[in-house]
Image (cartoon, rainbow, N blue to C red):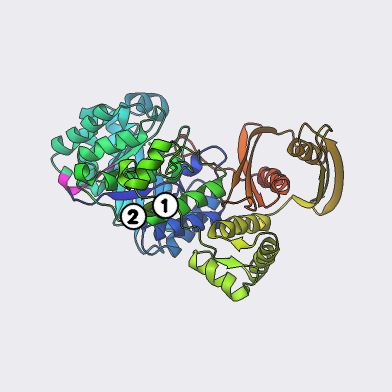
C-alpha cells in the first residue's frame, strides 16, 4: 500500500459510453490535455478496437500526452490487445487494460464459458498484453456480483502473469459501501501475491452509490480509483472524479492519502467536458454545480462572513471557482488570441481553422466585451464541429416573437451545398425555429432534451445550448453557442442533425461479439 491514491480518469472511454456523449478526435485531445493539466495519473483514452475513429483518438492522445499515463481498453482477445498495443506505441507511458467477466451470470449467459476457461483466457490476455506494454491492468467485469473465491483464484493467476493493477468493477452499480469494502479487503488479504499489484475500484452509479462505494474501498486498501469528470458514464454514470478527489483531500484526517491532482483545474475541466458532450451539470451537483458554494440563507451568509469555516468545508477557489478572468477583448489581435489558445492546450488543425476561429472571436468580441476562457472553449468547439462534414449549415435566421402573438421563424439553410428556406410557427421562438428546420430536414428525429446554460455570468454571456435527438434508437447530442440563444439553439439542432448524418457508429466494449 502507498499513501498515494492513483486517479484513473475514464471520461474518454466509459464516459463516452453515455448515450449521445460521443466526441470527435480533436475534442478528445482537448479533454486529454485538460486532464493532463489537472495531473490525472492515468487517462483511459478509449477502446482502440471499437472503431477506426477510436483507434485514431487513442493513438493521437498517446502521441500527445506526456505527463499522464495513457491507457486503452481491450477485451481478453488477441485482436483487441494487439490493437491497443499498436495505438499506444508512441506513448511516453502506456497501459493496456484488459478485462473479462467473472460473475456467474456473465460467464454463463454472455461469455458461455466455464470458469476455468475464463481464467485461462485472462492469463493468456495478460501475458500477451505484457509482451507489448510493461504496464498491464486486469479487470474482473461485474466483480460486484462475482464469487469471492473465484475472484481470488483468477486475480492470483493474472498477477502471476504480469498484471500490476487489478481492477474490481461494480459494473452494474449493485453493491453497497460495506459490502464493496469487504470484497476489497478480502482480496487484499487472501490473495498470496496481492502486494505485487495495486487494487483499483470502478463503480457505476445505478443506486447513487458510486462515490460512496469507491471511498469505502479506499478505506479498505484500494489505491486506484477509476472515475469520470462530472460522473459522466453508462446509464447513471461513474464515480465523479471531482467528488472523490475533494473527499480525500478534505477528509485527509480520515483517509491519510494524497492525490497528485491540481484541484484548481477542476471547474474548468468540468465545464469543458459538459460543453463538449452536451451533458449539463445540475446546479446542486457537488463541487462543480453552480450552487455548490452559494449560500442563500441569511444565517449561513452571516456565519460565512464572520468566519468562513462555519458553513464551508472547502474553498471555492481551491477547485477553480471565481477564476473567471477577462482574458481577451475587442482589441486583442491574432497573436494574443493564438497565445491564449496555446495556453489552454488548444491546437487548431489548420491555418484555415485558425482563421475561422479568429473571425468568430472578433465577431463575439463585438457583441460581448469581455471574453473568458470558457467563451474560447465554446468557440473552438463550434469551429471544430463546423469542420466535420456538415450536411446542414445555418445561413440566416429571423424570429418574430411578441406577447399575445404566435412566434414565427424563417430559416435559410445550406443543405449539402444547396440553399433551402422555410417558415414555421411554434409555441415559442425555439419551437418555431426547430419546426422551420424540420420542414427542410424532415429528419424523423424526436427531441429528447433541450437545455440552455449561460457559459459565463452576466446577461451578455453566450448561451450554450444542447439538443438531444433520437433517430431509430440512435441518440446524439448537438451543441451550439452564441450570445443570441435562438441562434445557439438553431446551431445545436443542426449540429445534432450533422452528427446523425455523419453516421459514426461506435462499438460497446461490454457487448460480446463487437
Ligand atoms: O464497468 C465496467 O466493468 C467496465 C470495465 C470494462 C472496466 O467499464
Ligand atoms: Zn464501467
Q: Which residue is mark 2?
A: 261
Foreground pick, 182 / 425: 425
How many marks can you see?
A: 2
Q: Quadrant of residue 285?
A: top left
x, y percentage for residue 123?
27, 42
Identified at 21% across, 47% down, the residue is 197
x, y percentage for residue 421?
86, 46
Determine if the magenta segment contains residue 254: no
Question: CB of residue at label 2: within 8 Å of ligand 2?
Answer: no
Asked if marks 1 and 2 touch (Cβ < 8 Å), the reply is yes
Residue 77 visible:
no
Q: Which residues are drawn in magenta? A: 195-200
Q: Is residue 453 above or below residue 56?
A: above
Residue 18 visible:
yes
Mark 2 Cα-neighbour bin, 10 Å: few <14, some 14–19, many ≥20: many
Foreground pick, 269 / 459: 459
Q: Is residue 303 above or below residue 64?
A: above
Disc 2 on helix, strand or loop? Answer: loop
Return the mark for residue 148. Answer: none
Q: Is residue 48 left or right of residue 144?
A: right
Report, in whole angstroms, how far the alpha carbon at label 1 lies from the one at label 2.
9 Å
Q: Quadrant of residue 364?
A: bottom right
Dividing the image into four quarters, tell me where ligand 2 lies: top left
Q: Is residue 116 left or right of residue 435?
A: left
Q: Is residue 146 above or below residue 127?
A: above
x, y percentage for residue 469?
65, 36
Return the mark for residue 266. Answer: 1
Mark 1 Cα-neighbour bin, 10 Å: few <14, some 14–19, many ≥20: many
Amino acid at each position: 500500500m502507498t499513501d498515494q491514491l492513483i486517479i484513473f480518469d475514464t471520461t474518454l472511454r466509459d464516459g463516452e459510453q453515455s448515450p449521445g456523449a460521443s466526441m470527435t478526435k480533436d475534442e478528445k485531445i482537448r479533454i486529454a490535455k485538460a486532464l493532463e493539466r489537472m495531473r490525472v495519473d492515468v487517462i483511459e483514452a478509449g477502446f482502440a478496437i471499437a472503431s477506426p475513429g477510436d483507434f485514431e483518438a487513442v493513438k493521437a492522445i498517446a502521441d500527445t500526452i506526456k505527463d499522464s499515463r495513457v491507457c486503452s481498453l481491450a477485451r481478453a482477445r488477441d485482436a483487441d490487445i494487439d490493437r491497443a498495443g499498436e495505438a499506444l506505441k508512441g506513448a511516453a507511458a502506456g497501459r493496456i487494460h484488459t478485462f473479462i467477466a467473472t460473475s456467474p451470470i456473465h460467464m454463463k449467459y454472455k461469455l458461455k464459458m466455464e470458469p476455468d476457461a475464463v481464467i485461462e483466457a485472462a492469463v493468456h490476455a495478460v501475458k500477451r498484453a505484457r509482451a507489448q506494454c510493461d504496464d498491464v491492468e486486469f479487470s474482473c467485469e461485474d466483480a460486484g456480483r462475482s464469487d469471492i473465491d473465484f475472484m481470488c483464484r483468477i486475480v492470483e493467476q493474472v498477477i502471476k502473469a504480469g498484471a500490476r493493477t487489478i481492477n474490481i468493477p461494480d459494473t452494474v452499480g449493485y453493491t453497497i459501501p460495506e459490502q464493496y469494502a469487504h470484497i476489497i479487503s478480502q482480496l487484499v488479504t487472501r490473495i498470496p501475491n496481492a502486494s505485487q499489484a495495486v487494487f483499483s475500484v470502478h463503480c457505476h452509479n445505478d443506486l447513487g452509490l458510486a462515490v460512496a462505494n469507491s471511498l469505502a474501498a479506499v478505506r479498505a486498501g484500494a489505491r486506484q480509483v477509476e472515475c469520470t469528470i462530472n460522473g459522466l458514464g453508462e446509464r447513471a454514470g461513474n464515480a465523479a472524479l471531482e467528488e472523490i478527489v475533494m473527499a480525500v483531500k478534505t477528509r485527509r484526517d480520515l483517509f491519510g492519502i494524497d492525490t497528485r491532482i491540481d484541484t484548481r483545474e477542476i471547474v474548468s475541466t468540468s465545464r469543458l467536458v459538459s460543453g463538449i458532450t452536451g451533458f449539463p451539470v445540475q446546479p446542486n451537483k457537488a463541487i462543480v454545480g453552480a450552487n455548490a458554494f452559494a449560500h442563500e440563507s441569511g444565517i449561513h451568509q452571516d456565519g460565512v462572513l464572520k468566519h468562513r469555516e462555519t458553513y464551508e468545508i472547502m474553498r471555492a477557489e481551491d477547485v477553480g471557482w471565481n477564476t473567471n478572468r477577462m482574458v481577451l477583448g475587442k482589441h486583442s489581435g491574432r497573436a494574443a488570441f493564438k497565445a491564449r489558445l496555446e495556453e489552454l492546450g488548444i491546437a487548431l488543425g489548420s491555418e484555415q481553422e485558425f482563421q475561422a476561429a479568429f473571425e468568430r472571436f472578433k465577431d463575439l468580441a463585438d457583441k460581448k466585451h469581455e471574453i473568458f476562457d470558457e467563451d474560447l472553449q465554446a468557440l473552438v468547439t463550434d469551429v471544430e464541429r463546423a469542420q466535420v462534414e456538415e450536411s446542414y449549415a445555418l445561413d440566416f435566421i429571423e424570429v418574430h416573437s411578441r406577447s399575445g402573438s404566435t412566434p414565427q421563424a424563417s430559416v435559410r439553410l445550406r443543405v449539402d451545398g444547396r440553399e433551402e428556406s422555410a417558415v414555421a410557427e411554434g409555441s415559442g421562438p425555439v419551437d418555431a425555429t426547430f419546426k422551420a428546420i424540420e420542414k427542410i430536414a424532415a429528419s424523423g428525429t424526436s427531441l429528447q432534451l433541450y437545455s440552455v446554460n449561460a457559459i459565463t455570468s452576466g446577461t451578455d454571456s453566450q448561451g450554450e445550448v444542447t439538443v438531444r435527438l433520437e433517430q431509430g434508437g440512435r441518440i446524439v447530442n448537438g451543441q451550439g453557442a452564441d450570445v443570441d440563444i435562438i441562434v445557439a439553439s438553431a446551431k445545436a439542432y443542426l449540429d445534432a442533425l450533422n452528427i446523425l448524418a455523419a453516421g459514426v457508429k461506435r462499438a460497446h466494449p461490454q457487448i460480446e461479439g463487437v
